[in-house]
Image (spheres, rainbow, N blue to C red):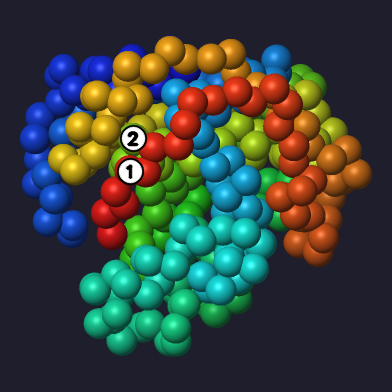
Amino acid sequence: MKSYLDLCKKIINEGQWIKNNRTGMRCLTIINVDLEYDVKNNHFPLITTRKSFYKTAIAELIGYLRGYDSAAQFRKIGCNTWNANANKNKAWLKNPNRKYKDDMGRVYGVQGRKWQRVDGTKYDQLKKVINNLKNGIDDRAEIITFFNPGEIELGCLRPCMHTHTFSLLKDTLYLTSYQRSCDVPIGLNFNQVHCFVLLMLMAQLTNHKAGKAYHKIVNAHIYENQLDLLQNIQLKRNPLPLPSLIINPKIKKLEDIENWVTVNDFSVQNYKHHEIIKYPFTI
């Protein structure tokens, strides 16, 4: 919580106003942020100065790991975050590559599970990383990337958190995640949950201990229409102790994620928080 609150204050105090061409909105912006999460000691980084909808974030991660490409698929597992970008994003609605209602195109998990090779075959990045780590292999390129420059126009949104690198030191697994753009009041806690859960889950799937998750953000910003709520409500609240995360120990392999795992297989203990804040979402 201290790192989160310090980041918010830094953006307010040191950020520069930049107009975002895609949204037409001004953002208070800084460049280069480094955060880290103590997965080893299970300090789950949920925001406590407002209610965090962590189940939606976990559902979104499950959808990525399954390679979902439709907002309808995400809705079915309890995640509504892709409805707007799939169906209200003006640029995507005009894009001839959009196939149908709810179509997200080749974004996030599609790239992670079905990267398009030149010869037309698909490459499963996630399966490669899991298989290597299970066998104690770290080739210094245990990387899952959702950012495919050659297919940017084939998806409704360029990936924000785009690359995850796993590092194995003896029996401990670490994660470094890279994010090109971060809406701090709304999106950041989703991304924090993704980092933490992804490392804890991958450690469980590959029979290793979880170490730390390192989270690098290039462009961190606060939209102009979010600033008042952040300054005058959220930053005036006192943070509360962090909760812990429990993952169903029956989750043992990738096929479990693909076939039966739900958000109910993830539980949070001792999560105390202040009231919800409804920040405006900019498409």
Q: Secondary structure at mark 2?
A: loop
Q: Which residue in the structure is indicated by mark 2?
A: 184
In the rendering, at what x and y percent does residue 106 appear?
A: 46, 70
Q: Secondary structure at mark 1?
A: loop
> Is residue 214 among the parts visible in the rendering?
no
Q: Amino acid at mark 1?
A: Tyr
Q: Residue at x 84, y 33 (%)?
A: 207
Q: Residue at x 37, y 66 (%)?
A: 85
- Image-based side of 198 in relation to 130, left or right: left
- Image-based side of 133 in relation to 213, left or right: right
Q: Quadrant of residue 279?
A: top left
- Image-based side of 82 in relation to 265, left or right: left
Q: Which residue in the structure is indicated by mark 1?
A: 279
Labels 1 and 2: the sequence-earlier one: 2
Q: Residue at x 87, y 45 (%)?
A: 252
In the rendering, at what x and y percent does residue 26 appear?
A: 11, 44
